[in-house]
Image (cartoon, rainbow, N blue to C red):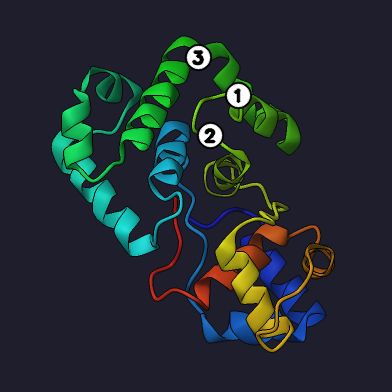
Amino acid sequence: MNPDYWDKAKRILAKRDLHLGSIIRSYQGDGLQLRGKGFQTLARAIVGQQISVKAADSIWRKLRKALVYVTPKRIAETPPDVLRACGLSNAKVLYMQSLAAHFLSNGKKIKNWPSMDDEAIIQELVAIKGVGRWTAEMFLIFGLGRPDVFPIDDLGLIKGIYRHYNQGVKMTKAELMLVGESWRPYRSLGTWYMWRVLDPVPVAY
């Protein structure tokens, strides 16, 4: 399911930004798919840290096979060796366990996330071991469907902007931010299409 803002954002940014408009037209029918489940979205983002989309999807399939349902309770109860056998590193096993513990003990806080602003959610999430700003931003994009997230440290986003806005030549962080500013208030959409042109598998967390 695409987020509510998606079709409107495509129309607006396709008219405003010729580079992005061309990309959007090249991928008709594609779109960001919302997960709608907080724990699964964050868990998938942890799995996907610093590895390819293909590798992350493979590990997630193995987790689903081993656990059937990837829930906080299942992660908390599963022996570390089983999680490692699915392809998780020692560090990511600890991160998944930390995330599961947070969800099991903070149900009331988690229910407030949809009513909180982006930065407040990020600050709460980064307090969880293994959840950095990038992981929190993936949750905002794919879990809550927030329209204006710009994960400036994401390598796929950076490479996409280099390729389509500067002929592949590196840019400063300030220059990258300027490209992002031109996409407001729909930077999540611009980010997703930068990922899309780089990977044959649409990015989804």
| Residue for point 32% across, 63% down | 54
Q: Earlier in the sequence, mark 1 or mark 3?
A: 3
- Label 3 sits on what residue type? Gly
Marks 2, 3: nearer the viewer: 2
Q: Position of residue 123 (x, y in %)?
A: 69, 29
Q: CA distance from mark 1 to mark 2?
A: 7 Å
Q: Nearer the viewer, residue 140 or 82?
A: 82
Instruction: Name the residue carrying label 3.
Output: 107
Q: Indicate the secondary structure of the residue bearing disc 2.
A: loop
Whether the residues at callouts 2 and 3 have beta carbons within 8 Å, the answer is no
Whether the residues at callouts 1 and 3 have beta carbons within 8 Å, the answer is no
Instruction: Name the residue carrying label 2.
Output: 131
Q: Indicate the secondary structure of the residue bearing disc 1.
A: loop
Q: Nearer the viewer, residue 125 or 144?
A: 125
Pointer 2 local density, CA inside 10 Å: few below 14, some 14–19, many at least 20: many
Q: Nearer the viewer, residue 182 or 92?
A: 92
Pointer 3 local density, CA inside 10 Å: few below 14, some 14–19, many at least 20: few
Whether the residues at callouts 1 and 2 have beta carbons within 8 Å, the answer is yes
Instruction: Name the residue carrying label 1.
Output: 127
Q: Indicate the secondary structure of the residue bearing disc 3.
A: helix
Q: CA distance from mark 2 to mark 3?
A: 18 Å
| Residue for point 44% across, 25% down | 99
Q: How many marks?
A: 3
- Label 1 sits on what residue type? Ala
Against 50, is 10 above or below?
A: below
